[in-house]
Image (cartoon, rainbow, N blue to C red):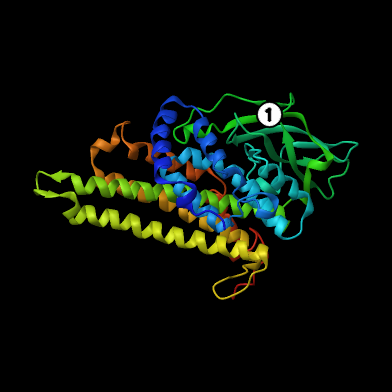
Amino acid sequence: MSPTAEDLLPESLLKTFRERAAVHDRENTFPGEDLADLRERGYLRLLVPTELGGLGASLLEATRIQRRLAEAAPATALSMNMHLVVTGAALHAHRLGVAPVRTILEDAAADRLFAFGISEAGNDAMLFDSSTRAEEQEDGGFALTGTKIFTSLAPVWDRLVVHGRVAEASEAEPRLVFGIIERTDEVETLDDWDTHGMRPSQSCTTRLHDAPILGDRVLTHTPVGPNPDPFVMGIFGAFELLIASVYTGIAERAITVGTGIATTRRSATKDIVHADDPDIRWRLAEAAIAVDGSILQIEKVMADLDALGTGEQGRGLSDHGPRWFLHFSGVKSRATETAIAAVDQVLRASGGAQYFRRSELERLSRDVRAGMYHPSDEESVHASYAKALLGEIGAPRPALPR
């Protein structure tokens, strides 16, 4: 039986994480102690099936665990998300019989930490194209040259999943390669993470200089452009829904903090505690209503993704067919925007003391805004939905009546 969020992350451990989070935010340092504690509790094996030595959690269970972790240490949760995205994608593909991804699950079972090197400056296509050049090698592997940005876990990862555009004489049918690299002299990690929020994630830039993907570490090849490859679909789904979970967890914590403030803060003008002030009650309720909606959306679509991989069918489960990617990005968009709005409501309900750096709400308000920068961003989500509704820009249209 896989662990519950409460079993894996007891309140005493979350209290410690919460205390550390303020220090690492202030000092702009990676929370190595958090990683050590999580490693000891089997977090890196969370999504590895039990028959391969893991904890056997489902993707749905991972969303709940990540929300709980984010309530204590948002940047730690965001960092660990990247390992869970990789192992979650491998779990999805493994369930569907894709053999090469087994190496990810076996490495994770051996407590190897995975990071995620996909983001590139200016590459709005993300998983579906790459500005990184991949040169094929004699062993069937590839040498990758390019720059990856926002590489969470940059100082500490053991394995990095990357993609690159295969360099070929003809670009008639361009393709991508996805694979695993290790830390070698060909991998350069910059010390360039100094940001508004999510500071302890240390999502530094990674430069690849003919970095090798060995032949037995190639995971999949795909055409350039959207495609149904099981590993790529697993990455997209796990990334969007786990990201949504982290920011929703931040909003849940903000509501908890704001509720506590409302019960102890008093209005001198009205001579009532803020918990009895109709305006304060409305703001906190508005935040809670919206966040509840996010949780329901995340859990529904992640349960459906679990079922797609296992072949489970039944009442309440859906195969979303051609709309899977729309739902993944739509849930992420709605959940992160909801989280930002909810934290803002709590701030407005909690008074000027929360503007000071000593306030947990002040830190949460900075961390939650990072959600707008993760793919899929608002522009790409709206573009995808507009394309689904209206077709490509400039597509032939029915003749208008004269």
Q: Residue at the right extreme?
A: 138
**Label 1, on which residue?**
207
Figure check: 128 above or below 402? above
- What x and y, as percent, mark residue 233? 67, 55
Which secondary structure lies at badge 1? Answer: strand
Q: Is residue 80 left or right of residue 171?
A: left
- Residue positioned 42% across, 34% down in the render: 21
**Residue at 47% of width from left, 50% of height from top?**
7
Between 224 and 148, which is closer to the camera in this rendering?
148
Q: Position of residue 297 (x, y in %)?
A: 49, 62
**Image-based side of 394 in relation to 344, left or right:** right
Above/below status of 154 relative to 50: above
The answer to whether any part of residue 1 appears in the image is yes
Q: Image quarter for residue 394?
A: bottom right
| Residue beneath the point at 29% across and 32% down | 356
User: In the depicted view, which residue is nearer to us: 267 or 214?
Assistant: 214
Q: Is residue 125 at all visible to an observer of this figure?
A: no
Quadrant where the image shows the C terminus: bottom right
The quadrant the N terminus occupies is bottom right
Q: Position of residue 215 (x, y in %)?
A: 84, 40
**Dot 1 amino acid type:** Arg
Q: Quadrant of residue 13?
A: top left
Q: Residues within 10 Å of mark 1 (few under 14, many from 20)?
A: many
Q: Is 318 rendered above or below residue 198? A: below
Q: Position of residue 360 (x, y in %)?
A: 34, 37
